Image: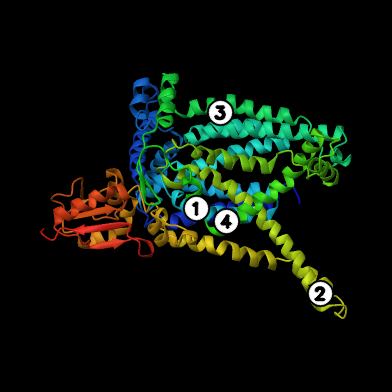
């Protein structure tokens, strides 16, 4: 199998096309997607940061006064400032000055859409370099068509951007090992700083990179010692030479992460420009001791520990398209067989070189017979695996909060897609071999001259990857588009889709964003200057629907059911009391509107007939 291919100019154009197409799709589907609860808070923070940026241009000395900095950047300082700064600049420049968007809310969302599109392009480039173009293209398509990721990629939040920046740092680290030199370690440090200033998921990156460096060192030592002791074939060293300075390359990248990364983090977050250590301790404490929110899982409402250890794997299986999961598992096991079997056999043979124990003797014979894997100075498969394992490992602890559904481990999804892309590429190669053999067998010895050449050309041509590719991406595309705009209610056929998940007691929604799905009803039925109890929709998120013109300007959102003309109820198990309050206040148990995917009630609208 070809390893670490060089990119052609065409690959840059393909990556750009992936990014542009994804951004265009996100923009085209944003109009009917309501605003999530957290988006409302980030709109407010972005407006404060935007005012500071304007002051910085008009009166730099006054803006840089510590009191001015703290007044602006104290808002939502439990999260770093990079992505919110992009929200602010997009709104200031692209909307208020250039008027590019029909809805103001889209101007805040646009930076996250662009970063998400860049993430799809990055997956393509990495898959192409590490395997081949088919692997890169299929990985990018499968990554883009993850229903939950597609939803988060729309939002003015940090969950999709950190996926891209996290993968970018891992990619730069991989290039540091593969290519050497000074450029890629520096870029690794910069990317790590950007990740730190995006979201606290970045804290896992040093764990992954250190574990990877140690793993490569152990692998090389095992194989080298086994070869020196005669426990491995003499050709092993020639076939898989240790990269010169491989350890130094890892250290250079890690050193850049430890030095350049914090400097970039500090420079881009004005909140920590003074009282740096106390504010960093406060930031770390907020996330390490985060309060627990409610989340339903298998019919039970979880609020405080112990949390279910099965949550992350079950939710992944229930929300990632089945074909993507299957290809991921095939790719993972193929990589483990290729990369682990040889060093493990060498290690077993070296531990007991003269042992007569059948198992150890068999290991020694296997090590002598095995062909060493192809040279891979970047340790690609190991890095991809560790990136997944480190992220999911956090959910082995019963104290890890499970609120937020799948968004907290989405940083693993690019690597799941990369393994899946590698498996797809291998499948195409096998299909081509099988097709050629089938054509030759059917035509037999009496085939016309040139038939064999035509069969080989057909097997090598675009037909096989086109047909297999269409078969592979059809379901993820259909599931992703069908899920919109109910993505947090979407589940795969593995659990029976949204209806099956509801029957199993899996969470239907959170964040109050599904208000966007009922604005047409509200515009039609709410009387002039009527009131709507907005339930789980944050006030700033409701206000943005008004500013966008999606809701009539005279419709007023209120915080209590009593006295309201209409009441929204976003279904969550721990919020059933909100529905009961509407029943009592309005004198009815029958909602006027029930909306949700595939007949599953997600948002209910109650009408006060007495008003």
Mark 1 vs 2: CB contact within 8 A? no
Numbered disc in front, either 2 or 3: 2
| Residue occupying image coordinates x 59% and y 28% | 257
Q: Which residue is mark 2?
A: 441
Report which quarter residue 503 is drawn in.
bottom left
- Give how far apart the Cα atoms at labels 1 and 4 are: 22 Å
Q: Which residue is mark 1?
A: 23
Dot 2 falls on a residue whose secondary structure is: helix
The answer to whether residue 319 is above or below residue 398 is below
Dot 4 falls on a residue whose secondary structure is: helix
Q: Residues within 10 Å of mark 1 (few under 14, many from 20)?
A: many
Specify the label residue 261 is tagged with. 3
Position in image of residue 246 (x %, y %):
74, 31
Dot 1 falls on a residue whose secondary structure is: helix
- Between discs 1 and 3, the one toward the N terminus: 1
Point out the image quarter for the C terminus: bottom left
| Residue occupying image coordinates x 26% and y 51% | 576
Q: Nearer the viewer, residue 436 or 256?
A: 436
């Amino acid at each position: 199998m070809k390893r670490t291919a060089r990119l052609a100019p065409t690959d840059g154009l393909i990556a750009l096309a992936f990014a542009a197409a994804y951004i265009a799709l996100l923009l085209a589907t944003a109009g009917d997607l309501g605003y999530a609860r957290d988006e409302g808070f980030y709109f407010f923070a972005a407006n404060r940061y935007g005012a500071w940026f304007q002051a910085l241009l008009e009166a730099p000395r006054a803006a840089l006064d510590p009191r001015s900095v703290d007044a602006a950047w104290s808002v939502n300082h439990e999260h770093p400032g990079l992505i919110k700064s992009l929200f602010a600049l997009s709104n200031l420049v692209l909307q208020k000055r250039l008027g590019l968007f029909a809805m103001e809310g889209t101007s805040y969302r646009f930076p996250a859409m662009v970063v998400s599109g860049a993430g799809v392009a990055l997956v393509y480039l990495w898959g192409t370099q590490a395997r081949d173009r088919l692997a890169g293209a299929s990985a990018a398509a499968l990554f883009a068509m993850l229903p939950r990721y597609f939803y988060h990629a729309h939002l003015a939040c940090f969950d999709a951007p950190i996926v891209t920046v996290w993968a970018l740092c891992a990619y730069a680290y991989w290039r540091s090992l593969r290519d050497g030199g000074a450029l890629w370690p520096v870029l690794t440090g910069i990317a790590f700083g950007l990740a730190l200033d995006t979201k606290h998921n970045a804290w896992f990156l040093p764990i992954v990179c250190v574990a990877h460096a140690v793993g490569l060192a152990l692998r090389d030592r095992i194989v080298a010692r086994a070869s020196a002791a005669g426990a491995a074939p003499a050709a092993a060293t020639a076939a898989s030479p240790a990269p010169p300075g491989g350890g130094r390359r890892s250290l250079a990248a890690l050193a850049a992460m430890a030095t350049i990364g914090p400097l970039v983090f500090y420079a881009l977050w004005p909140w920590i420009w003074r009282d740096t250590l106390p504010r960093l301790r406060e930031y770390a404490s907020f996330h390490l001791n985060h309060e627990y929110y409610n989340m339903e899982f298998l019919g039970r409402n979880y609020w405080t520990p112990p949390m279910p250890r099965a949550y992350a794997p079950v939710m992944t299986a229930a929300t990632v398209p089945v074909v993507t999961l299957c290809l991921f598992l095939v790719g993972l096991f193929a990589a483990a067989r290729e990369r682990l079997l040889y060093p493990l056999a060498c290690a077993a043979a070296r531990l007991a070189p003269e042992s007569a124990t059948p198992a150890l003797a068999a290991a020694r014979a296997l090590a002598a017979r095995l062909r060493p894997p192809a040279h891979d100075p970047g340790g690609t498969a190991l890095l991809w695996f560790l990136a997944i394992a480190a992220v999911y490992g956090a959910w082995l602890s019963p104290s890890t909060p499970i609120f937020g559904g799948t968004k907290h481990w989405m940083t693993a999804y690019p690597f799941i897609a990369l393994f899946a892309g590698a498996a797809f590429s291998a499948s195409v190669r096998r299909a081509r071999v099988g097709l050629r053999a089938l054509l030759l067998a059917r035509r037999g010895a009496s085939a016309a001259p040139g038939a064999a050449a035509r069969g080989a050309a057909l097997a090598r041509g675009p037909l096989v990857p086109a047909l297999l590719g269409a078969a592979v991406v059809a379901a993820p595309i259909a599931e992703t588009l069908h899920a919109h705009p109910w993505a947090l209610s979407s589940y795969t056929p593995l659990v029976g889709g949204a209806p099956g998940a509801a029957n199993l007691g899996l969470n239907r929604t959170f964040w109050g964003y599904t208000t966007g799905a009922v604005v047409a009803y509200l515009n039609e039925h709410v009387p002039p200057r009527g009131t709507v109890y907005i339930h789980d929709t944050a006030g700033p998120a409701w206000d943005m629907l008004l500013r966008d013109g999606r809701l009539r300007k005279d419709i007023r959102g209120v915080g209590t059911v009593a006295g309201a003309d209409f009441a929204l109820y976003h279904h969550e198990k721990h919020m059933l009391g909100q529905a009961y309050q509407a029943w009592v206040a309005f004198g009815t148990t029958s909602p006027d509107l029930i909306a949700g995917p595939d007949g599953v009630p997600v948002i209910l609208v109650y009408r006060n007939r007495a008003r």
